[in-house]
Image: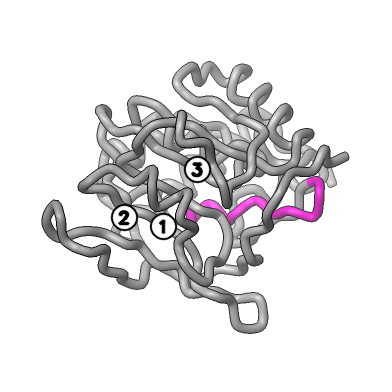
């Protein structure tokens, strides 16, 4: 497969943004974040002509890159603001990290595969993202020294919110994660509090192919 030229990349990005708007996403901050984040830069070269398709694309270590419409819907639903701290569990290629970083004050992304964390961090540097860190870490047991977060994104299916993750939620936080998958497809839920001090309540955001959140660390490839 031939990589997209710079002109074709710009045209594909513009067409993608039009389709996103036609699906009802009108948040200008999210649209600008998507426009400013070159998706093909985060996509494996042999799949770059598929970068804007509604497909999850394979990356190293048996992981996948979420389809761009899912990332757009996630960013819109989370209502990330410039003063928010965001915790991401599962850096993957770093694309979603970069989009969230265009919206938030700070993003901390944990990736259990060391090689993926390093590669994602390098891509973020290349596109000028300075307020995001990709760390090699266990997303099931994040260190409490990371502090509290206003938004949490888990790119995996959970039976329940791990205690270590729950302990990092700010009082008015929102969290996105998959419910246990059926035949590989999970209901992706967003947990929110209507008011501070109330329990988290879940609502359906989308459906996507997700694996269970794996524990521990791996050096990857």
Q: Is residue 1 above or below residue 202?
A: above
Asked whether the residues under the numbered discs 3 and 2 touch, taking CB atoms below 8 Å apart as contact, a structural biologist would say no
Circle 2 or circle 1, nearest the eye: 1
Residue pointed to by mark 3: 88
Percent coordinates x, y for residue 219 in the rendering: 82, 38
Kindly state the secondary structure of the residue where label 3 is placed: strand
Q: Residue visible at 50% across and 66% down?
A: 178
Q: Is residue 199 left or right of residue 45?
A: left
Residue pointed to by mark 1: 176
Q: Is residue 116 left or right of residue 30?
A: right
CA gap, disc 3 to disc 2?
A: 15 Å
Q: Is residue 65 magenta?
A: yes
Percent coordinates x, y for residue 189 in the rendering: 40, 67
Circle 3 or circle 2, nearest the eye: 3
Q: Nearer the viewer, residue 122 or 7?
A: 122
Number of disc labels: 3
**Residue 77, numbered circle:** 2
Asked whether the residues under the numbered discs 2 and 1 touch, taking CB atoms below 8 Å apart as contact, a structural biologist would say yes
């Amino acid at each position: 497969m031939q990589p997209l030229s710079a002109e074709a990349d710009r045209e594909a990005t513009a067409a993608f943004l039009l389709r996103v708007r036609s699906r009802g996403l009108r948040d200008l901050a999210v649209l600008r974040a998507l426009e400013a984040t070159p998706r093909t830069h985060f996509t494996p070269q042999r799949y770059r002509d598929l970068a804007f398709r509604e497909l999850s694309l394979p990356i190293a270590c048996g992981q996948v890159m979420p389809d761009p419409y899912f990332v757009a819907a996630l960013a819109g639903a989370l209502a990330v603001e410039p003063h928010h701290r965001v915790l991401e569990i599962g850096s993957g290629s770093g694309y979603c990290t970069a989009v969230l970083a265009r919206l938030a004050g700070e993003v901390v992304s944990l990736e259990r595969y060391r090689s993926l964390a390093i590669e994602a961090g390098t891509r973020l540097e290349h596109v000028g993202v300075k307020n995001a860190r990709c760390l090699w870490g266990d997303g099931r047991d994040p260190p409490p020294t990371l502090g509290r977060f206003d938004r949490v994104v888990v790119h995996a299916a959970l039976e329940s919110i791990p205690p270590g993750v729950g302990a990092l939620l700010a009082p008015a936080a929102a969290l996105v994660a998959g419910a246990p998958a059926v035949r590989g497809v999970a209901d992706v839920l967003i947990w929110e509090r209507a008011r501070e001090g109330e329990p988290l309540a879940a609502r359906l955001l989308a459906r996507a192919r997700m694996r269970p959140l794996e524990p521990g660390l791996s050096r990857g490839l």
